[in-house]
Every structure is written in C-alpha cells, then in structure tokens.
C-alpha cells in the first residue's frame, strides 16, 4: 500500500507520534515529555524536530528509531527527524498530562523550574500515598535523570524526575 503524502496531514503525523513513548517511561509520550518540538511539512516531506532530554542520553537514539518505526509502519513515505539542541530541553516543557502519567507510573514529577535545585530540601509528594514526608536517599536514581527518594510514611522508595 502506497500512501500519497498530500493525503496526510500534520495532525495525522502528530497522532502517530503520540504513540511514541519514552523508552524508559513507556507511559509517557514524547509529546507529553516535551521532547517533540515541532512537526512541519517541507514540500512533500514531514520534518519532525526533537530535543533530547539529557545530552548523551541513549534514550534519544531509541526515540529516533521508534519514530522511524512508527511512521514506516504507517506507510509515511517522506519524513526526516531533526535533533535540535538549543534551546535546551527543560522539565518545564513536560505537559501536565505528562506529569500526571509520570506520577501514576510511580515516579514523582519534577517540581520546580529549571536551574539547580536543592534536592536535600525537596520533598516531592510520594507517588504512592501523596505524603510530603519524604527524604532524599541518593541524588542519582535508576538513571542520571532521576534522584532516589524514600517516603517516611509508607516506607516506599521512589524515583523523582529531577528538574532540568
Ligand atoms: Zn508514601
């Protein structure tokens, strides 16, 4: 089956890209993560712009591969993925929906704005019981993007997605 590009809209492409998720957090789409910056059409080619979350994050290559896989599977004939490094990605670009899904997944969403943050004095609400009686265990959680916290009320350890 060959699809003509002129029948495909940017909205169609965005819908497909909503199904592309972060490899480390499979519940959150690249749109909700704020990684998907733009979808535009140049002549008959769709140009998809993404901004990596953390430089050198191996997940980004995976995301590019997933985008290629998704669009090829839907017979999108002409597209390319561009990586934009500036302005740098910030957790502020994460959508509210993204933060909600992150919490449901058991990861405390980023709290403040970009810039350095004082993890010792942060008390992200526990994603399991909502208690703010939480403490930092380690500045690095399961990945460098996250810090490990523990809830003093329900005793559950949890990852906190650091602001960036
Ligand atoms: Zn708790």
Image (cartoon, rainbow, N blue to C red):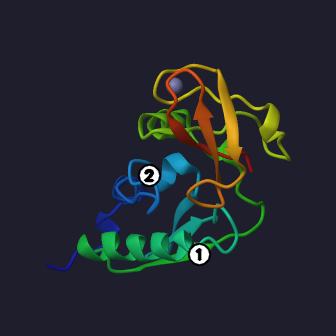
Q: Earlier in the sequence, mark 1 or mark 2?
A: 2
Q: In the figure, is residue 140 to the left or right of 73?
A: right
Q: Nearer the viewer, residue 110 or 2?
A: 110
Q: Nearer the viewer, residue 124 or 4?
A: 124
- Mark 1 or 2: the one toward you: 2
**Occupied quadrant, residue 125:** top right
* Residue 15 visible (yes or no): yes
Q: How far apart in space, not on screen, are marks 1 and 2 (Cα)? A: 18 Å
Q: In the figure, is residue 82 to the left or right of 164?
A: left
Question: Can you identify the residue that label 2 sits on?
Answer: 29
Q: In the image, residue 16 lies at what x, y percent?
A: 34, 58
Compared to residue 45, the image places residue 88 above or below, namely: above
Compared to residue 92, the image places residue 76 above or below, namely: below
Compared to residue 120, the image places residue 23 above or below, namely: below
Mark 2 crowd level (few <14, some 14–19, many ≥20, 10 Å Cα): many
Question: Can you identify the residue that label 1 sits on?
Answer: 82
Q: In the image, residue 81 lies at what x, y percent?
A: 52, 75
Residue in the picture at 62% in, 70% down: 57
Q: In the figure, is residue 103 to the left or right of 150?
A: left
| Mark 1 beta carbon near ligand 1 (under 8 Å) | no
Q: In the image, residue 131 lies at what x, y percent?
A: 57, 19
Q: In the image, residue 91 lies at what x, y percent?
A: 67, 46
């Amino acid at each position: 089956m060959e699809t003509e590009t002129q029948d495909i809209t940017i909205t169609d492409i965005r819908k497909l890209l909503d199904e592309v998720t972060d490899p480390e957090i499979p519940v959150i789409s690249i749109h909700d993560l704020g990684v998907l910056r733009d979808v535009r059409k140049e002549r008959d080619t769709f140009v998809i712009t993404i901004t990596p979350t953390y430089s050198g994050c191996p997940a980004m290559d995976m995301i590019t591969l997933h985008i290629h896989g998704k669009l090829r599977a839907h017979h999108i004939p002409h597209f390319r993925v561009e990586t934009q490094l500036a302005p740098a990605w910030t957790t502020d670009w994460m959508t509210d929906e993204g933060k909600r899904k992150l919490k449901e997944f058991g990861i405390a969403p980023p709290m403040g704005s970009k810039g350095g943050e004082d993890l010792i004095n942060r008390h992200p609400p526990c994603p399991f019981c909502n208690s703010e009686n939480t403490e930092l265990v380690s500045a690095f959680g399961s990945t460098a993007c996250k810090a490990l916290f523990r809830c003093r009320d329900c005793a559950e350890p949890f990852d906190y997605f650091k602001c960036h």
